[in-house]
Amino acid sequence: MGAAGDVTALITAARGGDPRATGRLISIVEDDAVAAVPVLQAIYPASHGAWLTGITGAPGAGKSTLADRLISRWVDEGRRVAVLAVDPTSPFTGGALLGDRIRMQRGAASPGVLVRSMATRGWLGGLARATERVATLCAGLGYDEVLIETVGVGQSEVDVAAAADTTVLVLAAGWGDGVQVAKAGVMEIGDVFVVNKADRADAAAAAAEIREMLQLAATGDGWQPAVVSTVATTGEGVTDLVAALSDHRSALGRSGSSDRATGRRLRDLQRALTDEMEARVLAQLDTPEGKRARAAVAAGDLDPWSAAAELSCR
């Protein structure tokens, strides 16, 4: 899989709806940053039409069930949807534990919907290392909506905000989330806040508390974050959520803000450069000099820092 013709054939087949071609391309982009380069180069010019929505929140808040509702709505509107569900990593196989995908049975079964589970594999920030590359691929393959669902996050896993056009933060009423949000980095990344499980008695108070805190939050693009109450299991409030997402898109369009897209492109550049340099470093370790340095370090005859300095000068 190195020839330009092979890449072009796979992309053509994937855009035509061939699931095997799509799966093959995703595997290439996900598993090998070097092999991903010709694929991403080929699809990049067509990758700017999709809208990327990130959905994040603590484990058990109802992210997957809510995502399933959004998928169904988008499908009903005739949109092609790609879902990248970041799951915990199996300690035995290194693969994704498919909890998110299991809870998306309704949306995943719809025609035109791609659901890809991605293992974190130790990558921090709530995403997998290749999530943003795969999102770019899906956009270039013609998906209108790319939904990124993070692994259950804490207070510092906020990478999804840099990867998405709109970030949805899901909180569950009754879990003390108001206190957590007040001190968490995630407070600053949400464009739309969802108080899920709103059939609980304290849901209205939780929503009011979040709205009060948001009054103190500065917004860089003129958008005042929306707060929506939902019951994902029944679909209650999902219409309000869809409206809030639409309002955010319109707000970004009215303000002419391209900061997020620009930031994402520059982030892609930084990641591409990092991948390129990492590949060169690993190749250096396989040279005769690199093998000698590895043997010396393994034997305790040379410290790693001196070895690295020697190899970097070659």
Image (spheres, helix red, strand yellow):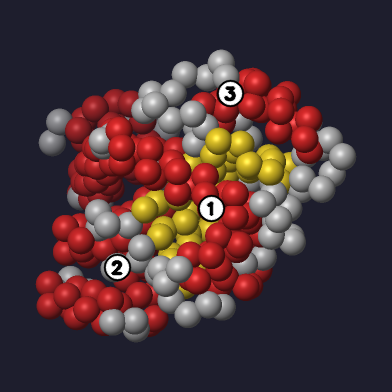
Residue at 37 percent across and 43 percent down: it is 250
How far from the left and from the top, in percent, is residue 87? 58, 56
The residue type indicated by label 1 comes to Val
Residue 115 located left or right of residue 273: right
The residue type indicated by label 2 comes to Gly
Dot 2 lies on which element? loop
- From the viewer's side, name the closer residue of 296 and 86: 86
Quarter where residue 204 is shown: top right
Residue at 55 percent across and 68 percent down: it is 72
Quarter where residue 278 is shown: top left
Mark 3, residue position: 214
| Residue contact at pointers 3 and 1, CB within 8 angstroms | no
Report if residue 130 is visible in the image: no
Q: Residues within 10 Å of mark 2 (few under 14, many from 20)?
A: many
Q: Quadrant of the N terminus?
A: bottom left
Mark 2, residue position: 142
Residue at 40 percent across and 51 percent down: it is 52
Residue 134 located left or right of residue 273: right
How far from the left and from the top, in percent, is residue 249? 39, 45
Of all residues, the one furthest to the right in this rendering is: 201
- From the viewer's side, name the closer residue of 229 and 275: 229
CA gap, disc 3 and disc 1: 20 Å
The residue type indicated by label 3 comes to Leu
- From the viewer's side, name the closer residue of 231 and 306: 231
Q: Tag 1 or tag 3, which sits nearer the N-term?
A: 3
Residue 241 located left or right of residue 134: right
Mark 1, residue position: 242
How far from the left and from the top, in percent, is residue 181? 65, 27
